[in-house]
Image (tube, rainbow, N blue to C red):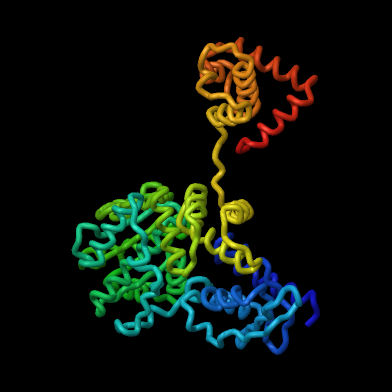
Amino acid sequence: MNDNGLERIWGNCLEFIKDNVSQTVYNSWFADIKALKLQDKELTIQVPSPFVYEYLEANYLGILKMAITRQIGEGAQLMYSVVTDKGNDIKAEYKSVNHTLDSYKEQQVLSNRTPGVLDAPKVQDLDPMLNPNYNFDTFIEGVSNKLARTAAETVSQNPGYSTFNPLFIYGESGVGKTHIANAIGIKVKELFPSKRVLYVSTHLLFMQYADAVKHNSISDFINFYQTIDVLIIDDLQELETYVKTQNPLFHIFNHLHLNHKQLILTSDRPPKDIKSLEDRLLSRFKWGLVAELEKPDLELRKRILREKTRRDGISLPDDVIDYIAENVVDNARDLEGAIVSLMAYSTTFNRDIDISLAKTILEKCSLIEEKPLTIDEIVQRVCDYFKVDSKLLQTKSRKREIVQARQVSMFLAKKYLDYSTSQIGATIGGRDHATVLHALNVVRNQLEIDRSFKEDMSEIEGSLSL
């Protein structure tokens, strides 16, 4: 195959992968992979180190094979060309483990084909579609998720008969909704092996319903779901898109609830904020408990990082753990992405993981939370530069260095913040707007005639988190 055709095929594979993994995972593990050749349905890709090869095989083989099979067809094979000595350009070739795609549950979730769960009448024939890695042992508890965690454990001990039925868990992406919902299903299967447990996304539910409409078997669709003992529906906010699915879902819900079957529902927002949701469904979602999973606080973020590194056999300095926890604040998924990125760069480039590398990687992966600039930060940066106590700016002192720091702070506050001169004066020293206007003129004039002062200002502005 010519280079253009190979490049197109691999480009399509990468697009599929990018759509199904986080941006951090894609940048860390897939972005630098190159396709070398395609021969007799065997695609050879080049990876930068044996570590990357082993990590892909252990964690992302399913999605790699799905992407390749979509482009090359059934029977596609994967071969790795692994750089073992970068200095001497020595490579080794490894054949991917010869799994069939059917052994991966990811296929059922990511592809457009509807899994045949409707054809599984017996308990032992029904795949619950649960991720075994998402269990209570791997779910780190903190203040932000304690309510949801406690309710989830209660439900798993007595499914269908606790007051938390349905259990509706909501929160932003990456805070652990899917994890805790799967953990309930796994615990139920451990305690009650005979119960029919099923995890399904709202998208997949709609695909099954669409198939049922197409084949005139809506009653079979509803009857199947009415046999489930513990039904877990993820990403319920997608009901906004799949409005037609709400009517059969209502009948399924009523039947399961009436017969003491357990429902676990997750969404990125509370029921009342799901647009186009029918009132009769909304009222039923509120019958049990609506629990929010909040963003992890600082202490929980540190615990998540320590547990992740412990499980992966990695040792990170405390200052690196602290730096990541203080700057990656949105969710656990980004925290784990930061660790994955550090591992990849450390191994590929043979660098120790230290605070310098952590800063570089987090900035490169856009994981650092942008913090808005404040007057307090401006004042502190200016005072640090001129080596004066920031508290003195609030006094009536007329010492030259304090006046200069006060005027520069006012100038920068006006330049970078949407504050009036009166607001700036009130915050910095309790001055009136006329004093601030005078300070602005003084600084502007000095910038025009004093090169040394202009360099000072440039350094101060460079230290601000703009």
Q: Residue at x 62, y 86 (%)?
A: 95
Splitting the image into 4 quarters, where does residue 230 fall? bottom left
Query: How far across and down, in percent of the image, does residue 160 sit?
Result: 22, 65
Q: Residue at x 49, y 83 (%)?
A: 102
Rendered position, 200 above or below 430: below
Splitting the image into 4 quarters, where does residue 449 fall? top right
Q: Residue at x 69, y 33 (%)?
A: 459
Rendered position, 372 above or below 167: above
Front position in the image: 232 or 10: 10
Q: Is residue 332 left or right of residue 41?
A: left
Query: How far across and down, in percent of the image, does residue 282 sit?
Result: 33, 52
Query: How far across and down, in percent of the image, does residue 70 sit?
Result: 62, 78
Quarter the N terminus occupies: bottom right
Rendered position, 31 above or below 408: below
Q: Residue at x 61, y 51 (%)?
A: 363
Confirm whether residue 189 shows in the render.
yes
Query: How far across and down, in percent of the image, does residue 359 sit?
Result: 59, 51
Report how many numbered discs are placed on residues in the image. Answer: 0
